[in-house]
Image: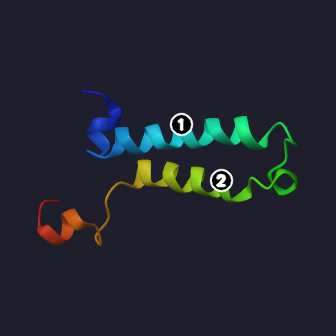
Amino acid sequence: MALSSQLNPWAPKVLSIVRIVAGLVFLVHAPQSFFPAVNQGDAAILYCFLFFYFFFAGPGPWSVDAKMGRE
């Protein structure tokens, strides 16, 4: 089993979102400037780190799985 499937069932999907957002940050915002505060990419970087946190944190006590009793 892969490490991502052992963490939670959504991990492969979230990791692919992180990869896409990180790639788009460099494709869209980095040609203007490397620094996010200058190239207006600060929200994209924030979402990238947010999804990266979701990858490691997994579903929490307020998740739909926990409310349905499947956790």
Horizontal side of residue 40 vs 50, given as left or right: right
Q: Residue at x 62, y 35 (%)?
A: 23
Q: Which residue is mark 2?
A: 44
Give the SS element for disc 1.
helix
Q: Residue at x 20, y 67 (%)?
A: 66
Say which of 47 and 29 sits in front: 29
Q: Residue at x 13, y 68 (%)?
A: 68
Instruction: Provide residue 50's location: percent of width, then percent of height.
Output: 54, 57
Q: Amino acid at mark 2?
A: Ala
Instruction: Provide residue 47's location: percent of width, then percent of height.
Output: 58, 56
Q: Quadrant of residue 27?
A: top right
Q: Quadrant of residue 60?
A: bottom left
Disc 2 vs disc 1: Cβ atoms closer than 8 Å? Answer: no
In the orientation shown, which residue stands out farthest toward the left?
69
Instruction: Provide residue 18's location: percent of width, then percent of height.
Output: 52, 43
The structure's colour scheme is rainbow
Residue 29 is labelled as: none
In the orientation shown, which residue stands out farthest toward the front?
28
Q: Amino acid at mark 1?
A: Arg
Classify 10 Å Cα crowding around label 1: few (below 14), some (14-19), many (20 and above).
some
Question: Considering only order in the chain, which callout, 1 or 2, is on the residue closer to the N terminus?
Answer: 1
Give the SS element for disc 2.
helix
How far is the residue under mark 2 from the one under mark 1?
12 Å
Q: Is 6 rendered above or below residue 54?
A: above
Horizontal side of residue 56 vs 4, given as left or right: right
Q: Which residue is mark 1?
A: 19
Horizontal side of residue 27 vs 11, given as left or right: right
Say which of 4 and 12 sits in front: 12
Q: Quadrant of residue 7?
A: top left
Q: Residue at x 84, y 41 (%)?
A: 34
